[in-house]
Image: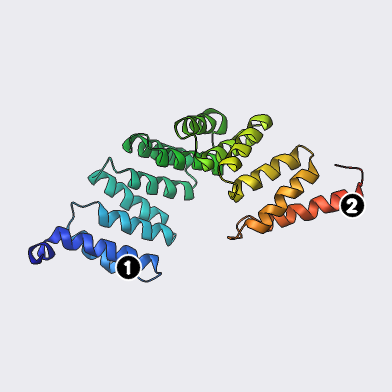
Amino acid sequence: AGTEAGDPAFRARTLAFLGHARAQAGRPAIELFEQARGLDPSSALPLYFYGIYLRQQGALTAATRLFEQALALDPDNAAIHVELARTKTELGNYAAAEVEYDAAVTAADNSPEMQFLRVLFYAQRGYRIADKGIPAGEALVEADTANAEAHNWLGWMYLLDGKADKAEEALRRALELDPQLVSARFHLARLLLLDGQESSAAIEYRRVVAEDLSGALRDQALHALQEIEASQSSTPGEK
């Protein structure tokens, strides 16, 4: 143990993990990352954690440089590709982000986890939905049929692409797999509202309000309910 503790590579890993833990606790960590880099310049780990810290601080260009340096040392590390993709996304460079998500999927041997992160990118950003997002989502649900989140975001992309029937099928399948998946219920409510089914949409929105403990979608659901109630009060004959 003493020999290991004196090994610069071991010390660099220890400082990198300590810096990451401090950063996640909201404490300063730059000095620890710099020490780790100096102890083991051949390791991608300090650069990876340092990049995450800078990205979370909003220093996106600096974070990009660190992730690129990390990939030069460890080019097949899927996690680093994902963090660089997230940084490129925050910079608004979706084309570059897509390249990194593709690289992450390849590096991880097409793991469902990495495929899902790529699908989430397409769906949440509304980027290349028809030609890339939907095919990626379809491939994922075929490979991981019980993945409720995958069905959810595929359904959302179908809706964005104007395929309402497929969207409803995918969203209801997501809720069959996980009835507590609030985002799928919110997406279903949006679909029903767009289809003119106000009463059915209101039922789903009310469930979102009741079940969204995080509050991420609760305010949007409440706003939609207010609009539905206003519409129904002005046109009592509407469904």
Query: In the visual, does 171 lie left or right of 226?
Result: left
- Mark 1, Cα crowd under 10 Å, few <14 / some 14-19 / many 20+, is many
The image shows a total of numbered marks equal to 2
Q: Which mark is residue 233?
A: 2
* Local secondary structure at mark 2: helix
**Between residues 70 and 106, which one lies in front from this camera angle?**
106
The residue carrying pointer 2 sits among few (fewer than 14), some (14 to 19) or many (20 or more) residues within 10 Å by Cα, namely: few
For residue 239, which quarter of the picture? top right
The residue indicated by pointer 1 is 29
In this view of the protein, can residue 39 be seen by the observer?
Answer: no
Q: Amino acid at mark 1?
A: Ala
| x then y, percent, for residue 113 | 41, 42
Q: Is residue 69 visible?
A: yes
Residue at x-position 29% and y-position 43%: 77
Q: Position of residue 44 (x, y in %)?
A: 25, 51
- The numbered mark, 2 or 1, whose residue comes first in the sequence reads 1
Above-or-below relation of 65 to 131: below
Asked which quadrant contains residue 161, the reply is: top right
> Horizontally, is 20 left or right of 124 in the view?
left
Residue type, label 2: Ser
Q: Quadrant of residue 54?
A: bottom left
Residue 167 lies left or right of residue 115; in this view the side is right
Q: Secondary structure at mark 1?
A: loop
The answer to whether residue 22 is left or right of residue 58 is: left
Residue at the image point whose x is 52% and y is 39% from the top: 150
| Location of residue 67 with respect to 95 vertically, above or below | below
Q: Mark on residue 13? A: none
- The N terminus, quarter of image: bottom left
Residue 210 locus on image (x, y percent): 67, 58
- Outermost residue toward the left in this view: 3
Residue 49 spot, x, y in % from top left? 32, 57
CA–CA distance in space, label 2 to label 1:
56 Å
